[in-house]
Amino acid sequence: MGQCRGNAGNLMQHWVLAETVMELQRHVGMDDRLLLVTSHSMAPWSVPSELTKPSSGDTRPQFDRARLRLSAPASPYEKAWAALSLYRAGLPYPSSAMLTRELWTGPLSVTLCEADGGVADEIAGWLSLPETRAQFQGELCRGDWRFRLQDGIRTADAGALFIEMDPMRFEHHPPPIGRDDRAVLFPEDLALLVHAVAGVEEPVVVQISSFSANNNNPHRLTEPVIVDVLAQGGFVQMGRAEANGNMMSVVFGRGVELWTEDTQSLEQRFSEWWQGRLAAA
């Protein structure tokens, strides 16, 4: 099995994913097909990594506190997590694709991109199961996700497209900063995404979650760059969540308006959930 990356980062990423999936379905219809595309796919099930050298920056205790409170799930994310996972035993933890299948009531198609050979093998095995094939259509793209997007994205009979990107960090610096780290997202990668969905007429939602602000990439510098690049493709920022100075998740939409009653509701509700569910007992 794969390992949970970020622990508390997974909490932020998947809380936002769950809220976005539920909100998107309210706008496009309960029976519409969703196409989910992920750039850095997780194994279908993950287990916690060992804390060999705990430090003040470790977020695993927050993850464990959230897990241990799943007996009284308080959000769509927690309900899906509890339904899919043996949470009382501490494992396993479901992937974005697993959570989306649990949350989306209509037909689902997934395109999962993964560069790590071992993780890709786990995804391939899961997609080949008869139970999985009976639930949704699945495509595995081995290697760098950028190669998959170069040919564009075709939604076929899908009523909406959801692109989830969870790089380790967003790098706003231009070259000569190196571009060979596949775990990092760059402005030109977002330009590629804009080009890949240029012909998509259905509603498109993009969620970008980053887990590190290393190399002088604080949110106050990176978020405006992300907004500017995606705006060139007609995308509007519709929600955000910030767990700490490193972890951030932002949601953009085109052809659909999410959380229209209160544009700050996502951030406010996440902050309340984060503080209420993860506070030390």
Image (cartoon, rainbow, N blue to C red):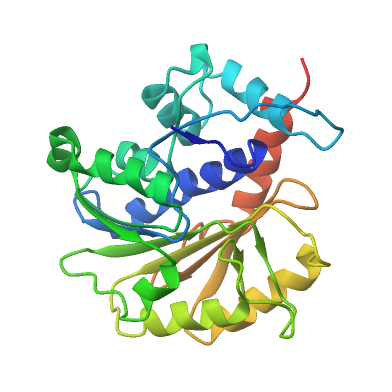
Q: Is residue 89 visible?
A: yes
Residue 177 picture location, percent across and down = 74, 79
Q: Is residue 248 left or right of residue 112?
A: right
Instruction: Find residue 198 and report its image quarter.
Output: bottom left
- Asked if 54 appears above or below 246 in the picture, the reply is above
Residue at (49, 29) in percent of width and height: 78
Residue 140 picture location, percent across and down = 29, 56
- Asked if 232 appears above or below 138 in the picture, the reply is below
Residue at (62, 25) in percent of width and height: 66
Of the pair 33 and 148, the residue shown nearer to us: 148
Of the pair 281 and 117, the residue shown nearer to us: 117
Q: Is residue 247 left or right of residue 187?
A: right
Exactly how many numbered labels are in the figure?
Answer: 0
- Asked if 232 appears above or below 102 in the picture, the reply is below
Residue 183 picture location, percent across and down = 58, 61
Of the pair 254 and 137, the residue shown nearer to us: 137
Residue that protrudes farthest toward the right in the picture? 56
Q: Is residue 71 visible?
A: no
Residue at (73, 55) in percent of width and height: 212
Q: Quadrant of the N terminus?
A: top left
Residue at (76, 25) in percent of width and height: 279
Residue 276 picture location, percent across and down = 70, 28
- Asked if 133 appears above or below 62 in the picture, the reply is below
Residue that protrudes farthest toward the front in the picture? 117
Of the pair 54 and 211, the residue shown nearer to us: 54
Instruction: Find residue 188 and report its image quarter.
Output: bottom right
Q: Quadrant of the C terminus?
A: top right
Instruction: Find residue 76 and report its image quarter.
Output: top left
Q: Is residue 128 left or right of residue 257?
A: left
